[in-house]
Amino acid sequence: MKKSIIRIVITGAAGRMGRQLIKLLKNENNMILIAAIARKDSEYIKVDVGNFIKTKKLGVIITDSLNEIIDDFDVLIDFSIPKFTLECLSFCIKKLKPMIIGTTGFNDQEKQIIINASKIIPIVYSSNFSIGANLLLKLAEKTTKIIGINSDIEIIDLHHRNKIDSPSGTALTIGESIANALGKNLKNCISDIKNRKKGTINFTTIRAGDIVGEHTVIFANIGEQIEIIHKVSNRATFAKGAIKASNWIIDKKIGLYNMKDVLNINDL
């Protein structure tokens, strides 16, 4: 049975996604923000989140310590950096609370830590929380099963100039989905441009201006090509997805989930 009011903690609160989440949460009827965590050197420490998003005071003061969070929260949403995400993960395990992870850039060892944690608490871990990006994943997977083995596959990844990980987490997730559809490991599917073989993947990364996020998947053959494109013009798209995931996970069993589970499109 779902709770009438879901109490949310946001970490990475001073970042782009943190701001969007705070803005959207204040308009959610069944959710309330009870804590906001930012990095220790943030200029917003001890600032009311209402002032932070240029609205009236909301009674939640931004802090830099997880230890200041009281036990009575229901879900922690994290869009930060891998090192801090793992700290949040340990905190949620200790409190036996669900976690939404939107951070990207994890190495294989860090991903394994998340997998192990999902045997103790419910986790939604996704490189992209938008509905369109997850539909792109399914379309790319289905296209791969039909023509992938005979195609040159290109994944083009565009983001703003300050994005650190390259390729993006979403681009890598697309690559992994295509590789899985080919029955292979992504590492074995990366294209050698000088000696390109069909059914291999090449990544192109562009970091420029203030591009929020754009991904294009191209399946090219002699005489024709198919392009699947997803563009995001506002980060609120990702925040809406994370809030949807928080609503969804509240009554779920222990396990590791993604946005395709939240959207119920795994079986499409």
Image (cartoon, rainbow, N blue to C red):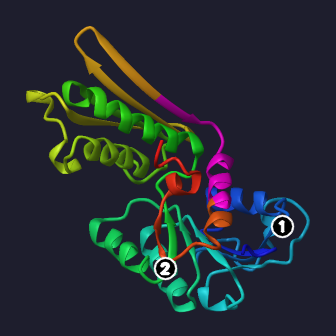
27 or 178: which is nearer to us? 178
Q: Residue at x 67, y 90 (%)?
A: 68
70 or 268: which is nearer to us? 268
Q: Position of residue 250 (x, y in %)?
A: 65, 72
Q: Is residue 233 magenta?
A: yes
Q: Residue at x 79, y 60 (%)?
A: 53
Which amino acid type is shown beneath numbered disc 1? Answer: Gly
Question: Is residue 8 rendered to the left or right of residue 154?
Answer: right
Q: Determine which quarter of the picture holds residue 31.
A: bottom right
The N terminus lies in quadrant: bottom right
Question: Is residue 116 rendered to the left or right of residue 36?
Answer: left
Q: Determine which quarter of the picture holds residue 203.
A: top left
Q: Position of residue 150 (x, y in %)?
A: 19, 25
Q: Secondary structure at mark 2?
A: helix
Bounds of the magenta segment: 229-244
Crowding at label 1, few (<14), some or many (≥20) Cα neighbours within 10 Å? Answer: some
* Residue located beneath label 2 in the image: 89
Whether residue 207 appears in this view of the structure is no
For the image, the number of numbered tags is: 2
Whether residue 244 appears in this view of the structure is yes
Which amino acid type is shown beneath numbered disc 2? Answer: Leu
Q: Determine which quarter of the picture holds residue 27.
A: bottom right
Q: Position of residue 215 (x, y in %)?
A: 45, 35
Q: Secondary structure at mark 1?
A: helix
Q: CA distance from mark 2 to mark 1?
A: 26 Å
Q: Is residue 21 magenta?
A: no
Q: Residue at x 42, y 74 (%)?
A: 83
* Residue located beneath label 1 in the image: 50
Q: Position of residue 210 (x, y in %)?
A: 57, 39
Question: Is residue 191 rendered to the left or right of residue 130?
Answer: left
